[in-house]
Image (cartoon, rainbow, N blue to C red):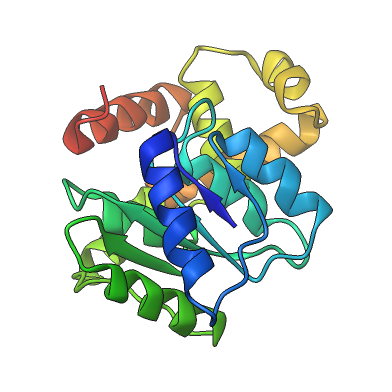
Amino acid sequence: MLADANPLMLTALSEIFEKDRRFSLVATAATAEGFLGMAMRMPVQVGVIGWTLPALGGARLIDVLRAQANAPRLVVYAEDSGDIPRKAMTAGAAGFVSRSESVERLLETCLAVANGQMVFPFLDVRSLKQDPIESLSPRERILLEALSKGLTNRELSRELNISANTVKFHLSNLFEKLAVKNRAQAIAFFYANRMTRGEV
């Protein structure tokens, strides 16, 4: 299954995979939501997605699918700019291929991923371990982002559809992982981290 916001890229990728007898193209989508909807309805072994898919984006799509049973293993096919390979790995992708690579490289990566391998360009994984954000669970990341909006515990409870006690439990874990003492420090950490990554 393929997903890319660029219709020309989607058409080109479709032709490449349809011509290769090692693959069976199930469906294509131009948005993350479209891909997600189809992936939930039909069995797919491997998906190739762009990183800047409309609405959800590649990282969020990977994160949502990762929680689903029998989700496809995802290969991110995108420009190798900035930190995208690392972000794709952190989100839970099974592989990354730069658009500057050959078509054969993309096909080989998809085959390797279908066989249970992870395929990424060289990444210094020490930096993954040093970043406290990477130690957070998906729920804790959502909580931190919601916390950054200045929400109270009661508002967080409503926003995340969890009990007030569960909010307190997650906040306690969050503070410990980020090595901060309170919500103000956690919010400051969140914005400082975004600025460091160039996401502001």
Compared across the picture, whether 50 is left or right of 144 comes to: left
Q: Position of residue 128 (x, y in %)?
A: 30, 62
Q: Is residue 91 visible?
A: no
Q: Is 138 displayed left or right of 125 in the figure?
A: right
- Where is 98 relative to 157, above or below? below
- Nearest to the observer: residue 162 or residue 71: 71
**Corner quadrant of residue 4:** top left
178 left or right of 98 in image: right
* Residue 123 higher or lower than 193, as above or below: below
Image quarter (top left, top right, bottom left or bottom right) of the N terminus: bottom right
Residue 146's place in the image compared with 128, above or below, is above
Instruction: Name the residue located 67 percent from the left edge and 44 percent from the top edge.
Output: 36
Of 146 and 88, the residue lying toward us: 88
Residue 58 location, x and y as percent?
A: 46, 43
Please name the residue shown 67% across and 60% down the image.
26
Is residue 47 something one can see in this rendering? yes
Task: Give the answer, above or below, for where 95 lies relative to 161.
Answer: below
Total number of numbered labels?
A: 0
**Left or right of 187, for residue 174:** right
Frontmost residue, 175 versus 131: 131
The C terminus - image quarter = top left
Name the spot of residue 141 as percent of width and height, x first.
Answer: 52, 40
